[in-house]
Amino acid sequence: MSGEILVLNSGSSSIKFALYTAARDPALVLQGMISGIDASPGFSAEDADGRPLPANLPEGGAAPLTHETALARLFDWLARGGHSTELLGAGHRVVHGGVRYAEPVRIDAGVYAELERLVPLAPLHQPHNLAAIRVLMKLLPDLPQVACFDTAFHRTQPMIAQSFALPREITAGGVQRYGFHGLSYEYIAGVLPQTLGTRADGRVVVAHLGAGASMCAMLRRRSVATTMGFTALEGLMMGTRTGAIDPGVLFYLMREKSMTPAQVEDLLYHRSGLLGVSGVSSDMRLLLASTDPHAREAIELFCYRAARELGSLAATVGGLDALVFTAGIGERAAPVRARICKQARWLGVELDEAANREHRAVISTPSSRATACVIPTDEEIIIARHTGRLLGIGNPGRAN
Protein backbone atom coordinates (compact mmCIF):
# COMPACT_ATOMS: atom_id res chain seq x y z
CA MET A 1 0.00 0.00 0.00
CA SER A 2 1.44 3.38 -0.99
CA GLY A 3 1.21 6.33 1.34
CA GLU A 4 2.77 7.51 4.56
CA ILE A 5 2.21 7.61 8.32
CA LEU A 6 2.74 10.82 10.28
CA VAL A 7 4.10 10.56 13.82
CA LEU A 8 3.71 13.51 16.20
CA ASN A 9 5.17 14.18 19.63
CA SER A 10 3.56 17.43 20.73
CA GLY A 11 4.94 19.35 23.71
CA SER A 12 4.34 22.71 25.32
CA SER A 13 6.85 24.62 23.17
CA SER A 14 7.58 22.33 20.24
CA ILE A 15 6.22 19.58 18.02
CA LYS A 16 8.50 16.77 16.88
CA PHE A 17 7.35 15.06 13.71
CA ALA A 18 8.38 12.11 11.57
CA LEU A 19 7.08 10.59 8.37
CA TYR A 20 7.23 6.84 7.69
CA THR A 21 6.35 4.67 4.74
CA ALA A 22 2.97 2.96 5.14
CA ALA A 23 4.17 -0.64 5.23
CA ARG A 24 4.14 -3.68 7.48
CA ASP A 25 7.63 -2.58 8.57
CA PRO A 26 7.60 1.25 8.28
CA ALA A 27 10.75 3.02 7.11
CA LEU A 28 11.68 6.58 8.01
CA VAL A 29 11.18 9.14 5.24
CA LEU A 30 11.96 12.36 7.10
CA GLN A 31 11.85 13.88 10.57
CA GLY A 32 12.07 17.28 12.19
CA MET A 33 10.82 19.73 14.76
CA ILE A 34 8.74 22.88 14.89
CA SER A 35 9.79 25.06 17.81
CA GLY A 36 8.63 28.41 19.09
CA ILE A 37 5.09 27.66 20.20
CA ASP A 38 4.23 30.76 22.21
CA ALA A 39 7.65 32.15 21.23
CA SER A 40 9.76 32.88 18.13
CA PRO A 41 9.03 30.29 15.42
CA GLY A 42 11.66 27.77 14.35
CA PHE A 43 11.71 24.80 11.97
CA SER A 44 14.21 22.07 11.12
CA ALA A 45 13.94 18.83 9.16
CA GLU A 46 16.17 16.12 7.77
CA ASP A 47 15.78 13.10 5.53
CA ALA A 48 16.23 9.47 6.56
CA ASP A 49 20.00 9.76 6.09
CA GLY A 50 20.26 12.83 8.31
CA ARG A 51 20.69 15.33 5.49
CA PRO A 52 19.05 18.72 6.23
CA LEU A 53 15.92 19.53 4.23
CA PRO A 54 15.08 23.09 3.16
CA ALA A 55 12.54 24.72 5.45
CA ASN A 56 10.98 27.08 2.86
CA LEU A 57 7.98 27.58 5.11
CA PRO A 58 5.16 29.91 4.08
CA GLU A 59 5.38 33.45 5.36
CA GLY A 60 3.83 33.66 8.80
CA GLY A 61 5.52 36.63 10.31
CA ALA A 62 7.29 36.55 13.65
CA ALA A 63 4.11 36.09 15.69
CA PRO A 64 4.28 33.27 18.25
CA LEU A 65 2.97 29.96 16.97
CA THR A 66 0.05 27.99 18.35
CA HIS A 67 -0.30 24.23 17.93
CA GLU A 68 -2.82 24.91 15.17
CA THR A 69 -0.69 27.36 13.19
CA ALA A 70 2.39 25.18 13.67
CA LEU A 71 0.66 22.10 12.26
CA ALA A 72 -0.91 24.13 9.45
CA ARG A 73 2.60 25.22 8.40
CA LEU A 74 3.82 21.64 8.64
CA PHE A 75 1.07 20.36 6.35
CA ASP A 76 1.73 23.15 3.87
CA TRP A 77 5.42 22.19 3.88
CA LEU A 78 4.59 18.50 3.45
CA ALA A 79 2.17 19.29 0.61
CA ARG A 80 4.83 21.21 -1.30
CA GLY A 81 7.04 18.15 -0.91
CA GLY A 82 4.30 15.87 -2.22
CA HIS A 83 3.59 14.14 1.10
CA SER A 84 0.38 15.42 2.72
CA THR A 85 -1.93 13.98 0.03
CA GLU A 86 -0.52 10.51 0.74
CA LEU A 87 -1.13 10.46 4.50
CA LEU A 88 -2.98 7.33 5.62
CA GLY A 89 -2.88 7.95 9.36
CA ALA A 90 -1.30 9.84 12.24
CA GLY A 91 0.16 8.38 15.42
CA HIS A 92 0.64 10.41 18.59
CA ARG A 93 2.76 10.02 21.69
CA VAL A 94 0.33 10.49 24.59
CA VAL A 95 1.95 10.55 28.00
CA HIS A 96 -0.88 9.13 30.09
CA GLY A 97 -3.26 6.27 29.34
CA GLY A 98 -4.40 5.78 32.92
CA VAL A 99 -5.51 2.34 34.09
CA ARG A 100 -7.75 1.76 31.09
CA TYR A 101 -5.34 1.99 28.17
CA ALA A 102 -2.70 -0.72 28.24
CA GLU A 103 -2.46 -0.77 24.43
CA PRO A 104 -2.47 1.85 21.66
CA VAL A 105 -5.96 2.84 20.57
CA ARG A 106 -7.61 4.42 17.54
CA ILE A 107 -8.97 7.82 18.53
CA ASP A 108 -12.64 8.69 18.30
CA ALA A 109 -14.74 11.20 20.23
CA GLY A 110 -15.17 8.81 23.15
CA VAL A 111 -11.46 8.01 23.43
CA TYR A 112 -10.58 11.68 23.19
CA ALA A 113 -12.99 12.50 26.04
CA GLU A 114 -11.37 9.76 28.17
CA LEU A 115 -7.92 11.17 27.51
CA GLU A 116 -9.09 14.64 28.50
CA ARG A 117 -10.26 13.21 31.83
CA LEU A 118 -6.67 12.07 32.46
CA VAL A 119 -5.27 15.61 32.21
CA PRO A 120 -5.12 16.03 36.04
CA LEU A 121 -2.75 13.03 36.16
CA ALA A 122 -0.28 14.69 33.75
CA PRO A 123 -1.17 18.40 33.64
CA LEU A 124 2.20 19.48 32.19
CA HIS A 125 2.16 16.99 29.31
CA GLN A 126 -1.28 15.62 28.44
CA PRO A 127 -2.90 18.92 27.32
CA HIS A 128 -0.17 19.46 24.72
CA ASN A 129 -0.41 15.88 23.44
CA LEU A 130 -4.16 16.34 23.05
CA ALA A 131 -3.75 19.73 21.36
CA ALA A 132 -2.17 18.09 18.31
CA ILE A 133 -4.93 15.47 18.15
CA ARG A 134 -7.59 18.17 18.36
CA VAL A 135 -5.94 20.28 15.66
CA LEU A 136 -5.71 17.31 13.28
CA MET A 137 -9.40 16.57 13.88
CA LYS A 138 -10.06 20.09 12.63
CA LEU A 139 -7.54 20.32 9.78
CA LEU A 140 -7.88 16.74 8.48
CA PRO A 141 -11.16 15.37 9.90
CA ASP A 142 -11.04 12.18 7.80
CA LEU A 143 -7.48 11.24 8.76
CA PRO A 144 -7.41 8.25 11.18
CA GLN A 145 -5.46 8.95 14.37
CA VAL A 146 -3.90 6.61 16.93
CA ALA A 147 -2.81 7.31 20.52
CA CYS A 148 0.28 5.46 21.82
CA PHE A 149 0.83 5.72 25.57
CA ASP A 150 3.99 6.19 27.63
CA THR A 151 2.31 4.39 30.54
CA ALA A 152 1.13 1.28 28.66
CA PHE A 153 4.37 -0.74 28.79
CA HIS A 154 4.29 -0.77 32.59
CA ARG A 155 0.81 -2.28 32.92
CA THR A 156 2.47 -5.73 33.09
CA GLN A 157 3.84 -4.91 36.55
CA PRO A 158 2.44 -6.80 39.54
CA MET A 159 -0.03 -4.74 41.54
CA ILE A 160 2.37 -4.55 44.48
CA ALA A 161 4.77 -2.60 42.25
CA GLN A 162 2.00 -0.20 41.22
CA SER A 163 0.66 0.50 44.71
CA PHE A 164 1.16 3.28 47.24
CA ALA A 165 0.62 2.70 50.94
CA LEU A 166 -2.50 4.87 50.94
CA PRO A 167 -6.08 4.24 52.02
CA ARG A 168 -7.86 2.02 49.53
CA GLU A 169 -10.46 4.62 48.60
CA ILE A 170 -7.68 6.89 47.34
CA THR A 171 -5.95 4.11 45.41
CA ALA A 172 -9.29 3.13 43.89
CA GLY A 173 -9.55 6.67 42.55
CA GLY A 174 -6.49 6.11 40.33
CA VAL A 175 -3.67 7.21 42.65
CA GLN A 176 -1.02 4.60 41.91
CA ARG A 177 2.34 4.16 40.23
CA TYR A 178 1.98 4.35 36.44
CA GLY A 179 5.52 4.75 35.12
CA PHE A 180 6.51 6.56 31.94
CA HIS A 181 8.96 6.42 29.00
CA GLY A 182 7.12 3.24 28.03
CA LEU A 183 7.50 3.74 24.27
CA SER A 184 11.27 3.94 24.70
CA TYR A 185 11.32 0.82 26.88
CA GLU A 186 9.12 -1.03 24.40
CA TYR A 187 11.59 -0.30 21.62
CA ILE A 188 14.58 -1.41 23.72
CA ALA A 189 12.78 -4.60 24.76
CA GLY A 190 12.19 -5.41 21.11
CA VAL A 191 15.83 -5.07 20.06
CA LEU A 192 17.53 -6.49 23.17
CA PRO A 193 18.21 -9.92 21.61
CA GLN A 194 20.35 -8.28 18.91
CA THR A 195 22.84 -7.16 21.59
CA LEU A 196 22.28 -9.55 24.48
CA GLY A 197 21.26 -12.81 22.81
CA THR A 198 19.70 -15.17 25.34
CA ARG A 199 20.39 -12.72 28.16
CA ALA A 200 17.69 -10.47 26.72
CA ASP A 201 15.01 -12.45 28.58
CA GLY A 202 16.92 -12.34 31.84
CA ARG A 203 17.22 -9.74 34.61
CA VAL A 204 17.66 -6.49 32.70
CA VAL A 205 17.63 -2.89 33.93
CA VAL A 206 17.25 -0.20 31.27
CA ALA A 207 18.39 3.34 32.13
CA HIS A 208 16.57 5.93 30.00
CA LEU A 209 18.74 8.93 30.87
CA GLY A 210 17.90 12.28 29.31
CA ALA A 211 16.36 15.59 30.34
CA GLY A 212 13.62 13.35 31.67
CA ALA A 213 15.14 10.25 33.25
CA SER A 214 13.88 6.93 34.54
CA MET A 215 14.90 3.29 34.86
CA CYS A 216 12.96 0.08 34.30
CA ALA A 217 13.57 -3.47 35.51
CA MET A 218 12.51 -6.18 33.06
CA LEU A 219 12.07 -9.94 33.14
CA ARG A 220 11.37 -11.71 29.85
CA ARG A 221 11.43 -8.19 28.36
CA ARG A 222 8.36 -7.12 30.30
CA SER A 223 8.24 -4.30 32.85
CA VAL A 224 8.47 -5.47 36.46
CA ALA A 225 9.26 -2.16 38.21
CA THR A 226 10.18 1.40 37.24
CA THR A 227 11.40 4.53 39.00
CA MET A 228 8.70 6.98 37.88
CA GLY A 229 5.37 6.72 39.65
CA PHE A 230 2.09 8.65 39.72
CA THR A 231 3.78 11.45 37.78
CA ALA A 232 6.93 11.88 35.71
CA LEU A 233 8.46 13.67 38.71
CA GLU A 234 9.37 10.66 40.85
CA GLY A 235 12.56 8.64 40.83
CA LEU A 236 15.82 9.81 39.28
CA MET A 237 17.21 13.33 39.37
CA MET A 238 16.55 14.92 35.96
CA GLY A 239 17.41 18.01 33.93
CA THR A 240 15.13 20.35 35.86
CA ARG A 241 13.11 17.91 38.03
CA THR A 242 13.94 16.80 41.54
CA GLY A 243 13.13 13.14 41.25
CA ALA A 244 12.26 11.42 44.55
CA ILE A 245 11.88 13.84 47.46
CA ASP A 246 10.64 13.60 51.03
CA PRO A 247 6.99 14.83 50.95
CA GLY A 248 7.75 16.62 54.21
CA VAL A 249 9.92 19.05 52.24
CA LEU A 250 6.79 20.19 50.40
CA PHE A 251 4.90 20.81 53.63
CA TYR A 252 7.88 22.76 54.95
CA LEU A 253 8.08 24.94 51.84
CA MET A 254 4.37 25.74 51.96
CA ARG A 255 4.19 26.26 55.70
CA GLU A 256 7.50 27.93 56.51
CA LYS A 257 8.34 29.61 53.19
CA SER A 258 4.74 30.51 52.28
CA MET A 259 5.05 28.93 48.86
CA THR A 260 1.83 28.26 46.99
CA PRO A 261 1.14 24.86 45.37
CA ALA A 262 1.81 26.43 41.98
CA GLN A 263 5.18 27.76 43.17
CA VAL A 264 6.13 24.37 44.60
CA GLU A 265 5.13 22.67 41.35
CA ASP A 266 7.26 25.11 39.36
CA LEU A 267 10.19 24.51 41.71
CA LEU A 268 9.99 20.72 41.47
CA TYR A 269 9.46 20.54 37.70
CA HIS A 270 11.37 23.49 36.29
CA ARG A 271 14.01 24.83 38.74
CA SER A 272 15.52 21.73 40.34
CA GLY A 273 17.51 18.72 39.12
CA LEU A 274 20.78 19.33 37.28
CA LEU A 275 19.86 22.99 36.79
CA GLY A 276 19.02 23.62 40.43
CA VAL A 277 22.03 21.86 41.92
CA SER A 278 24.58 23.21 39.44
CA GLY A 279 23.20 26.70 38.99
CA VAL A 280 24.79 26.40 35.54
CA SER A 281 22.59 24.40 33.19
CA SER A 282 20.21 21.46 32.81
CA ASP A 283 22.28 20.23 29.86
CA MET A 284 24.64 17.40 30.82
CA ARG A 285 27.00 18.30 27.94
CA LEU A 286 27.57 21.77 29.35
CA LEU A 287 28.00 20.43 32.88
CA LEU A 288 30.62 17.90 31.80
CA ALA A 289 32.54 20.68 30.07
CA SER A 290 32.24 23.08 33.03
CA THR A 291 34.94 23.69 35.66
CA ASP A 292 32.36 24.96 38.16
CA PRO A 293 32.47 22.76 41.30
CA HIS A 294 28.68 22.95 41.52
CA ALA A 295 28.46 21.42 38.05
CA ARG A 296 30.63 18.50 39.20
CA GLU A 297 28.42 18.15 42.26
CA ALA A 298 25.31 17.97 40.11
CA ILE A 299 26.86 15.23 37.94
CA GLU A 300 27.90 13.24 41.01
CA LEU A 301 24.42 13.48 42.49
CA PHE A 302 22.82 12.43 39.19
CA CYS A 303 25.04 9.34 39.00
CA TYR A 304 24.60 8.51 42.68
CA ARG A 305 20.82 8.56 42.35
CA ALA A 306 20.96 6.36 39.25
CA ALA A 307 23.29 3.83 40.92
CA ARG A 308 21.09 3.76 44.02
CA GLU A 309 17.94 3.14 41.97
CA LEU A 310 19.78 0.46 40.01
CA GLY A 311 20.34 -1.46 43.22
CA SER A 312 16.66 -1.14 44.13
CA LEU A 313 15.51 -2.36 40.71
CA ALA A 314 17.97 -5.25 40.71
CA ALA A 315 16.45 -6.36 44.00
CA THR A 316 12.99 -6.58 42.38
CA VAL A 317 14.23 -9.08 39.78
CA GLY A 318 16.71 -10.95 42.00
CA GLY A 319 19.97 -9.74 40.49
CA LEU A 320 21.34 -8.31 37.27
CA ASP A 321 22.20 -9.91 33.94
CA ALA A 322 22.37 -6.72 31.90
CA LEU A 323 22.39 -2.94 32.29
CA VAL A 324 21.30 -0.96 29.23
CA PHE A 325 21.90 2.77 28.72
CA THR A 326 19.69 4.73 26.33
CA ALA A 327 18.34 8.24 25.53
CA GLY A 328 20.42 11.43 25.20
CA ILE A 329 22.67 11.17 28.27
CA GLY A 330 22.70 7.38 28.30
CA GLU A 331 23.73 7.15 24.65
CA ARG A 332 26.27 9.98 24.55
CA ALA A 333 27.69 10.79 28.01
CA ALA A 334 30.50 8.26 28.52
CA PRO A 335 31.65 9.79 31.86
CA VAL A 336 28.14 9.36 33.30
CA ARG A 337 27.97 5.74 32.18
CA ALA A 338 31.41 5.13 33.68
CA ARG A 339 30.43 6.50 37.08
CA ILE A 340 27.25 4.43 37.23
CA CYS A 341 28.97 1.23 36.09
CA LYS A 342 31.76 1.63 38.64
CA GLN A 343 29.17 2.01 41.39
CA ALA A 344 27.53 -1.18 40.09
CA ARG A 345 30.58 -3.42 40.47
CA TRP A 346 28.87 -5.22 43.33
CA LEU A 347 26.19 -6.28 40.83
CA GLY A 348 28.79 -7.86 38.56
CA VAL A 349 29.39 -4.96 36.16
CA GLU A 350 32.99 -4.62 34.98
CA LEU A 351 33.45 -1.59 32.75
CA ASP A 352 35.65 -1.70 29.63
CA GLU A 353 36.98 1.87 29.72
CA ALA A 354 38.04 1.95 26.06
CA ALA A 355 34.74 0.50 24.82
CA ASN A 356 32.86 3.08 26.85
CA ARG A 357 34.93 6.00 25.56
CA GLU A 358 34.37 4.79 22.00
CA HIS A 359 30.61 4.41 22.57
CA ARG A 360 30.57 0.77 21.52
CA ALA A 361 27.38 -1.27 21.83
CA VAL A 362 28.85 -3.39 24.65
CA ILE A 363 30.86 -1.45 27.22
CA SER A 364 31.57 -4.20 29.76
CA THR A 365 34.54 -6.57 29.72
CA PRO A 366 34.17 -10.12 28.34
CA SER A 367 34.55 -11.46 31.91
CA SER A 368 31.85 -9.19 33.35
CA ARG A 369 29.08 -11.20 35.07
CA ALA A 370 26.55 -8.53 34.03
CA THR A 371 26.66 -7.10 30.52
CA ALA A 372 26.62 -3.30 30.20
CA CYS A 373 25.58 -1.93 26.83
CA VAL A 374 24.40 1.15 24.95
CA ILE A 375 21.34 0.93 22.69
CA PRO A 376 19.91 4.02 20.96
CA THR A 377 16.16 4.29 21.45
CA ASP A 378 13.53 5.03 18.80
CA GLU A 379 10.09 5.91 20.15
CA GLU A 380 8.85 7.18 16.79
CA ILE A 381 9.19 3.84 14.99
CA ILE A 382 7.17 2.20 17.76
CA ILE A 383 4.39 4.75 17.22
CA ALA A 384 4.52 4.23 13.44
CA ARG A 385 4.29 0.45 13.83
CA HIS A 386 1.35 0.63 16.21
CA THR A 387 -0.43 3.12 13.97
CA GLY A 388 0.03 0.94 10.91
CA ARG A 389 -1.12 -2.16 12.78
CA LEU A 390 -4.27 -0.57 14.15
CA LEU A 391 -5.19 0.91 10.77
CA GLY A 392 -4.50 -2.33 8.91
CA ILE A 393 -1.71 -0.73 6.87
CA GLY A 394 0.50 -3.30 5.17
CA ASN A 395 -1.96 -6.08 6.05
CA PRO A 396 -4.24 -6.93 3.15
CA GLY A 397 -6.50 -8.92 5.46
CA ARG A 398 -7.58 -5.84 7.38
CA ALA A 399 -9.49 -2.77 6.26
CA ASN A 400 -8.34 0.77 6.99
Image (cartoon, rainbow, N blue to C red):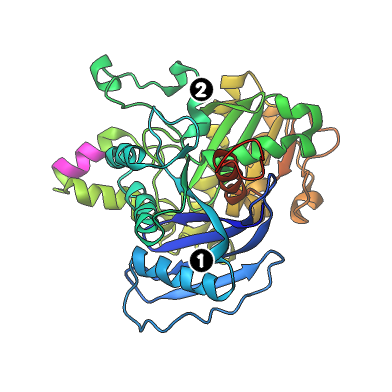
Left or right: 352 in relation to 126: right
Residue 297 in view here: no
Viewport quadrant of the C terminus: top right
Q: How far is the residue under mark 1 from the one under mark 2? A: 34 Å
Mark 2 closeness class: few <14, some 14–19, many ≥20 residues within 10 Å: some
- Reading the chain from its start, which is encountered first: label 1 or label 2? 1
Q: Secondary structure at mark 2?
A: loop
Q: Which residue is mark 2?
A: 157
* Mark count: 2
Q: Is residue 192 left or right of residue 171?
A: right
Q: Position of residue 42 (x, y in %)?
A: 45, 75
Please tell me whether residue 123 is drawn above or below residue 60 in the rendered image.
above
Residue 306 occupies quadrant: top right
Per the rendering, the mark at residue 33 is 1
Per the rendered image, the range of residues in magenta is 250-255
- Quadrant housing residue 177: top left
Q: Residue at x 51, y 22 (%)?
A: 157
Is residue 84 in view from this perspective? Answer: yes
**Amino acid at pointer 1:** Met
Q: Please rate how many residues cluster around mark 1, counting C-alpha atoms within 10 Å: few if below 14, some from 14 to 19, many from 20.
A: some
Indicate the amino acid at tag 2. Answer: Gln
- Residue 64 lies, in percent from the top left, at 32, 74
